Amino acid sequence: MANYPDDLQYTKDHEWIRITGDTGRVGITFYAQDSLGDVVYVDLPKVGTTVKANEPFGSVESVKAVSELFSPVSGEVIEVNTKLADAPELVNTSPYDEGWMIVIRLSNPGEVDALLSAAEYEDFINEK
């Protein structure tokens, strides 16, 4: 399960979140970036934006397509990965570390319970 770290939780829209206290760092999964191909642009919200679980917060553009990004939880964006403006390829080369997208202060921590574990996410993509 090297491509799906156990310390993350996942959505069926192929986003991941790493929960630390009352915040969560969000990005897209290895599967998502692999399906997209080379990422050339990432459109992210501004700090202070309110996001809602399962609703779009931005988009990622690759050589193949433009795909919406969906928030795994509700809350306020408190940090944005500004490195992606100049280096969107970090989404491909380091989807779980340097290629993260936003940090959210959770407004409803219970929403995390609806997310998938690494094993559940891997089962989900293997069914495709």
Image (cartoon, rainbow, N blue to C red):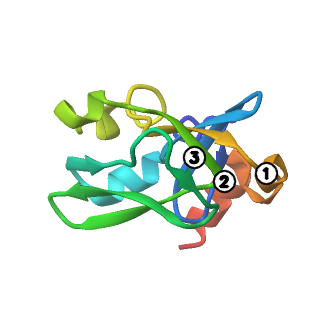
Quadrant where the image shows the N terminus: top right
| SS category of the residue bearing label 1 | loop
Real-space Cα separation, disc 2 to disc 1, in angstroms: 7 Å
Vertical order, 98 against 12 (above or below): above
On screen, residue 89 versus residue 34, left or right, reads left
Q: Which of marks 3 and 1 is in front?
A: 1
The residue indicated by pointer 3 is: 16
CB under 8 Å between discs 2 and 1: yes
The residue indicated by pointer 1 is: 108
CB under 8 Å between discs 3 and 1: no
The residue indicated by pointer 2 is: 73
Residue displayed at 65% across by 56% down: 121
Residue type at numbered disc 2? Val
| SS category of the residue bearing label 3 | strand
Q: Nearer the viewer, residue 69 or 57?
A: 57
Q: Which of marks 3 and 1 is nearer the N terminus?
A: 3
| SS category of the residue bearing label 2 | loop
